[in-house]
Image (cartoon, rainbow, N blue to C red):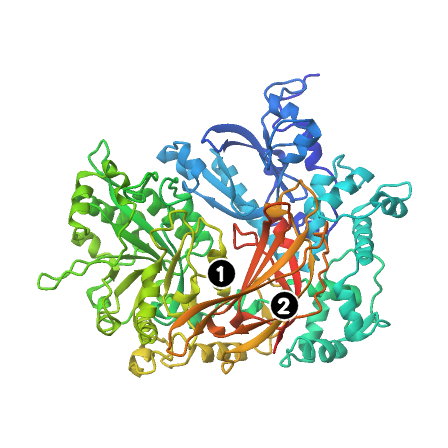
């Protein structure tokens, strides 16, 4: 009998129907009735865009358990089906690959290929725009752009698809959004270890039986970085003649973990006694929350809500006894879960997740704003590729100010001028100005409540190109473009809340005829003369004159922020609030060290005006400068190279993780209000819709006190936090904190790799701070500490430092703790992950540190479960 043509291979069908772990997450995904998944379970035809911009026909399938997304080769014939050569060579579906260095045997090849896209890997879904390098290379027709879908996953990777069928396209978008939402809503009710085992289950359950054989158990240990002596002996003791199920594997891993010894168990014995297996909510409150965590504001009701939530977390601890009916208690095994859970995050969950709308009513100059430098570049400043993808990456990372270096391009067949964006006079490639604006517009379309996005235009274009730029801005952005009125330039700046969903321009506005022209303060590019032939005639004229041409009125009328040259702050502060300075890294230090009064004057200027800082021109490798000094001076737009994942960018991620990563952080009183104490009180009142003037600290305290009787709901309904305690307004530096590195949990390999030996992790801690000298000069201060390395254990490494490392905090308002997890290796050590916590958002006691992949601010894939346990005390 002849079989009908099939949409997916028999192998894929078997795999998508294979038994999956019966976890709480699986139940939540499987019982999502908001979307009809049937078409996607059967498979839909798509065109996958490769790294080189080629189109490949594939079949996209969602597994019936909702855990995985597969992209497989389309069947080619009838009968038993004819698959492509690559599909026949691989025993499992192919999506992309990690670390393939050569084609060897089938087993090695299969492990080196990513077989599926797990729901835990999903970061975002975007549609209807060309926003990746792969799509840029694909030469897509304008009419086909609406048929594009980009699935972001695993930190910085994308799966780019063309789906012609509008029903399939909308269905896929809805399904992916619902899958991710369902997973994120339930994952906090599952322990990290259970999530990790579920995450790797597809990869290790090779025969797809739902049970683990001896060989597969060895794969589990390799994946989770857990070297155990005589592992098969432990396996056989647990399994007998059978294979292990998911709960049995979890139980065995717990037993092996206990043999290693755990900090949580030692801490339990220290606090509650070795003979205690259960502790009441009252004892937990008195002996741990108050005595060790220092949270004296927490009540018994708060702790009972906390313990009730903890006791519902899925751990697969089959033998765990249950408390007496009606008693709210915690078991010692749950204590381990709590210590590494998000509930116990050292980064105050309130500061992370709670976005206080009333704190967004001040003028823009009152905020630190997440800012990118030369956003278009993917690498160095001289010859790297420019891409629109970097703008979408920056925006998704929380950036709210992006830079465009605009130059004359060419004219199309209709004679329309097309400006380009690139690092002028270098070998970097070019992208169309209009394409970047379309990407920004796409982002705002899909995030309509975003706080304002500032486009920093470095304009080197001739008048005809500037006019077309203005036309493109208005045509593409429409009413999203903020068009200032003339009166807006003579009053205080608008607030972030008043500009939600808007795009604001920073550039130059030409002076009035009787005014003295004011030059921008952009640093001359020392590498500009390297390729003079690349300049257009108008650009050569610009180079000879040494300054850009005047801006046409069509573009100037759309611009809010006008760049002016810095001379001295006493004169600058008298200028309109819409006038601002751009100051390079070398000039920051020159200004600060020239005179001790410059630092407080600069802070005062930054209360009403804006300052943008940017890296030195000599940083051709796109490295970054230390941003802490500029933040301490009150500079709002501290521009960093987002393509370089160095310490500066990680500090930037840590600062702007606050308030749901909204991109705007209200500056603290020491940076803001002390310098503005002589300002007219009425102007401050006008900036607040309620009409009352309160300091930043008072506003936070008022908001937290209004919610003090309710638990903080951190993004998810099921995620209840202890009551927020605002940072003490009277806690000024200097003071000391002590830090001990205790243990880790579920630590991945560098870059989340699947293959390789178990890691030998160690932790470094650094404090980045600002120290004020006797004459008032501000200097960056950095202190570091490194732990010892733990050999062959990333699953549950134990450092158990007994002596605390003491750090002096000079200025807590701009001080940061930076935790780095590093793998010790022969030769060059390899960084695994980072976490940065502003001292103002730090919780003391025994706390978990949630590690992030350095490529993204979100915790996805194998980094979603990685934590450290530390002890932080205030001396």
Label 1 neighbour load within 10 Å: few <14, some 14-19, many 20+: many
Label 2 neighbour load within 10 Å: few <14, some 14-19, many 20+: many
Where in the figure is residue 456, as x and y percent of width and height? Answer: 31, 55
Q: Residue at x 88, y 48 (%)?
A: 238
Residue in front for this viewpoint, 800 or 256: 800
Q: Is residue 804 visible?
A: yes
The tally of labels here is: 2
Where in the figure is residue 87, as x and y percent of width and height? Answer: 62, 25
| Residue 715 image-quadrant placement | bottom right
Where in the figure is residue 22, as x and y percent of width and height? Answer: 75, 49
Q: Residue at x 25, y 58 (%)?
A: 559
| Residue 738 image-quadrant placement | bottom right
Question: For the residues carrying marks 1 and 2, which lies nearer the camera in this image?
Answer: 1
- Using the numbered discs, state the Cα–Cα distance from disc 1 to disc 2 in whole angstroms: 27 Å
- Looking at the image, residue 568 sits to the left or right of residue 635; the answer is left
- Looking at the image, residue 860 sits to the left or right of residue 324; the answer is left
Residue in front for this viewpoint, 339 or 488: 339
- Looking at the image, residue 148 sits to the left or right of residue 185; the answer is left
Check the image and report above or below for 607 versus 316.
Answer: below
Disc sitting over residue 270 in the figure: none
Please tell me whether mark 2 sits on a helix, a strand or a loop.
Answer: strand
The residue carrying mark 2 is 720
Check the image and report above or below for 414 versus 725.
Answer: above
> In which quadrant will I find the C terminus?
bottom right
The residue carrying mark 1 is 651
Counting residues from the start of the chain, the first of labels 1 and 2 encountered is 1
């Amino acid at each position: 009998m002849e079989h009908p043509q099939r949409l997916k291979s028999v192998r894929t069908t078997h795999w998508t129907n294979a038994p999956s772990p019966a976890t709480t997450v699986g139940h939540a995904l499987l019982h999502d009735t908001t979307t009809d998944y049937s078409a996607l379970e059967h498979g839909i035809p798509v065109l996958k865009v490769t790294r080189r911009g080629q189109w490949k026909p594939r079949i996209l399938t969602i597994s019936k358990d909702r855990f995985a997304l597969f992209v497989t080769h389309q069947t080619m014939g009838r009968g038993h089906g004819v698959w492509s050569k690559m599909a026949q060579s691989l025993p499992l579906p192919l999506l992309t690959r990690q670390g393939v260095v050569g084609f060897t045997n089938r087993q090695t090849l299969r492990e080196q290929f990513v077989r599926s896209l797990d729901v835990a890997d999903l970061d975002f879904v975007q549609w209807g725009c060309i926003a990746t390098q792969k799509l840029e290379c694909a030469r897509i027709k304008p009419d086909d752009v609406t048929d594009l879908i980009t699935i972001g996953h695993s930190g910085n990777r994308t799966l780019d698809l063309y789906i012609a069928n509008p029903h399939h396209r909308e269905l896929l978008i809805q399904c992916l959004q619902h899958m991710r939402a369902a997973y994120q809503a339930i994952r906090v009710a599952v322990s990290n270890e259970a999530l990790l085992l579920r995450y790797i289950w597809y990869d290790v359950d090779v025969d797809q039986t739902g049970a683990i054989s001896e060989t597969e158990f060895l794969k589990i240990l390799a994946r989770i970085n857990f070297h155990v002596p005589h592992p098969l002996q432990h396996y056989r003791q647990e399994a007998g003649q059978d294979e292990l199920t998911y709960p049995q594997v979890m139980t065995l891993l717990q037993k092996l973990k206990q043999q290693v010894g755990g900090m949580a168990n030692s801490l339990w014995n220290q606090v509650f006694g070795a003979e205690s297996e259960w502790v009441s909510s009252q004892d937990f409150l008195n002996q741990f929350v108050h005595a060790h965590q220092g949270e004296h504001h927490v009540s018994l009701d708060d702790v009972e809500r906390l313990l009730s939530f903890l006791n519902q977390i899925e751990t697969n601890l089959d033998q765990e006894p249950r408390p007496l009916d009606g008693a709210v208690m915690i078991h010692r095994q749950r204590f381990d879960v709590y210590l590494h859970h998000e509930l116990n995050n050292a980064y105050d969950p309130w500061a992370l997740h709670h976005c206080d709308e009333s704190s967004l009513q001040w003028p823009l100059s009152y905020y630190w704003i997440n800012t990118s430098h030369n956003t278009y570049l993917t690498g160095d400043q001289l010859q790297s590729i420019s891409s629109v993808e970097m703008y979408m990456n920056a925006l998704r990372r929380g950036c709210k100010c992006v830079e465009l270096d605009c130059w004359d391009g060419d004219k199309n067949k209709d004679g329309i001028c097309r400006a380009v964006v690139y690092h002028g006079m270098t070998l970097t490639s070019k992208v169309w100005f209009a394409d970047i604006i379309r990407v920004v517009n796409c982002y705002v379309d899909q995030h309509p409540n975003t706080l304002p996005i500032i486009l920093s235009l470095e304009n080197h274009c001739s008048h005809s190109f500037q006019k077309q730029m203005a036309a493109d801005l208005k045509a593409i952005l429409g009413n999203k473009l903020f068009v200032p009125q003339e009166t807006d330039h003579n009053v205080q700046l608008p607030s972030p809340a008043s500009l939600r969903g808007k795009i604001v321009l920073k550039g130059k506005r030409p002076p009035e005829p009787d005014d003295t022209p004011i030059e921008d303060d952009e640093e001359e590019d020392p590498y500009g003369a390297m390729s003079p032939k690349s300049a257009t005639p108008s650009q050569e004229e610009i180079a000879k004159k040494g300054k850009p041409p005047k801006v046409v009125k069509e573009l100037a009328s759309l611009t809010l922020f006008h760049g002016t040259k810095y001379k001295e702050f006493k004169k600058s502060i008298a200028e309109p609030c819409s006038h601002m300075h751009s100051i390079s890294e070398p000039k920051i230090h020159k200004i600060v060290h020239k005179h001790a009064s410059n630092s407080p004057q600069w802070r005062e200027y930054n209360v009403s005006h804006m300052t943008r800082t940017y890296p030195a021109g000599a940083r051709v490798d796109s490295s970054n400068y230390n941003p802490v000094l500029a933040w301490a001076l009150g500079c709002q737009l501290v521009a960093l190279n987002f393509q370089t994942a160095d310490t500066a960018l990680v500090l930037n991620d840590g600062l702007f993780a606050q308030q749901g990563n909204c991109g705007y952080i209200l500056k603290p009183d020491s940076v803001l209000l002390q310098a503005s104490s002589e300002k007219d009180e009425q102007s401050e009142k006008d900036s607040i819709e309620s009409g009352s003037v309160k300091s930043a600290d008072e506003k936070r305290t008022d908001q937290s006190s209004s919610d003090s009787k309710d638990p903080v709901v951190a993004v998810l309904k099921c995620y209840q936090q202890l009551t927020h305690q605002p940072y003490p307004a009277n806690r000024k530096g200097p003071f000391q904190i002590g830090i001990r590195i205790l243990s880790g949990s579920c630590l991945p390999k560098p870059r989340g790799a699947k293959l390789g030996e178990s890691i030998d992790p160690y932790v470094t801690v650094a404090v980045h701070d600002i120290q004020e000298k006797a004459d008032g000069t501000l200097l960056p201060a950095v202190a570091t500490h490194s732990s010892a390395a733990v050999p062959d254990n990333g699953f549950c490494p134990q450092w158990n430092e007994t002596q605390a490392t003491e750090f002096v905090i000079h200025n807590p308002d701009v001080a940061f703790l930076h935790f780095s997890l590093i793998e010790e290796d022969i030769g060059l050590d390899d960084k695994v992950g980072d976490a940065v916590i502003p001292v103002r958002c730090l919780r003391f006691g025994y706390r978990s540190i949630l590690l992030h992949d350095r490529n993204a601010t979100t915790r996805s894939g194998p980094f979603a479960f990685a934590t450290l346990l530390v002890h932080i005390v205030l001396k």
